[in-house]
Amino acid sequence: MKLHEIAEKLNLRVEGDGEVGITGVNTLEEAGSTELTFLSNPRYTPKVKTTAAAAVILGEKTPSDGIAIPVLRAPDAYLAFARALELFYAAPTLPPGVHPSAVIDPTATIGADARVGACVVIGPDVRVGDRVTIHPNTTIYPGATIGDDCVIHSNCAVREYVALGNRVILQNNVTVGSDGFGFAQRPDKSWHKIPQSGDVHIEDDVEIGAGTTLDRGSLGTTRVGRGSKLDNLVQIGHGSRVGEDTLLCAQVGLAGSCEIGDRVILAGQVGVVGHLKVGNDVIVTAQSGVPNDVEPGKHIAGSPAYDHRQWLKVIATQQKLPDLVKTIRDLERRLAKLEQAETE
């Protein structure tokens, strides 16, 4: 594909030779003489001048001085890279139809052009939409609903009465609708399991990473809003609600009945205490613990988490603590000498 053809497809502007042939997309370090690369992180700017790539995607305001290869100008270089990659890479897919080893209950409804892999089990009263792909060894429990154009990778479990919207992607080993952690203590201190009769709704355009679990509650709905993305090994507690276009990064854990707003970013290993509300547009730094409600727009960090800028000051101060302790001890000794001199 010619560089100018890529520019036309992605609505980008070419600076330099648009007739350059492009066979793929690669990193600055690894791109070859027929590949397109990109710069989105300023720290890698020096590598643009030494890359072997055929062309590079740059932001509109990124200087191109000293760059000898053609440039594609983009409002957002990283987004343009992602879209360019789609032009060259298509994930492997299953052949059309249902594999002979799949077990599908007669009451289940399978939409047009669906692809169902080997050893898939689809239970009673399940509804699978059009153009859905279900990879091998996946189990769909009774009464579940799968929207159009979903992709469910191998070894997933979609439990009873779960509803997936359109264009939902479940990576390998996702479990949607497992029982929430609900137990009532008996007089003898043993635990009585509370029936988890609630359901789970995953709205349109949600992607859920490998090994992630989303629990149903005893009552009500656990919900993930439209366009949200959950990374690998995320735990969504029973009855929690995640807003739209929110990112939950690896190993985030939400206890039961949390309410997470729209466009929130919880970085890796963030933990949120149950029954809390995290407002829209909040950012929580990695490994932070959230013990209280968070107002919209806040950027917090630490465990327990608090204002991010204050947290940075605290971290910077911690590195100075040994010197501060030494200074305080020196001052204490000097003060003691002064007090002794006054009494003599």
Image: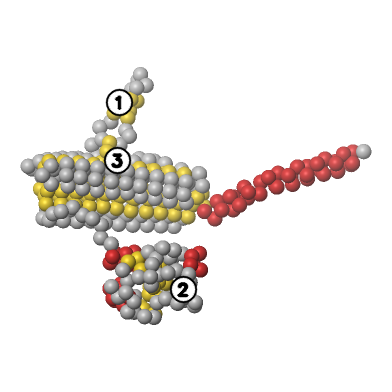
Amino acid type of the residue tagged 3 in the rendering:
Asp
Compared to residue 232, the image places residue 83 above or below, namely below
Front: mark 3 or 1: 3
In percent of the image, x 47 and y 55: which residue is there? 299
Give the percent coordinates (x, y) of residue 107: 8, 43
Amino acid type of the residue tagged 1 in the rendering:
His
The answer to whether the residues at label 1 and label 2 have Cβ atoms under 8 Å apart is no
Nearer to the camera, 262 or 67 = 67
The earlier-in-sequence mark between 3 and 1 is 1
Report whether residue 79 is seen: no
**Left or right: 341, with 281 as reference point:** right
- Residue furthest front as drawn: 33
According to the image, label 1 marks what residue?
192
User: SS for tag 2?
Assistant: loop
Disc 1/disc 2 C-alpha distance (Å): 62 Å
The earlier-in-sequence mark between 1 and 2 is 2
Nearer to the camera, 245 or 279 = 245
Amino acid type of the residue tagged 2 in the rendering:
Thr
Tag shown at residue 215: 3
Nearer to the camera, 237 or 86 = 86
In percent of the image, x 25 and y 57: which residue is there? 91
Nearer to the camera, 295 or 201 = 201
Disc 2/disc 3 C-alpha distance (Å): 45 Å
According to the image, label 2 marks what residue?
62
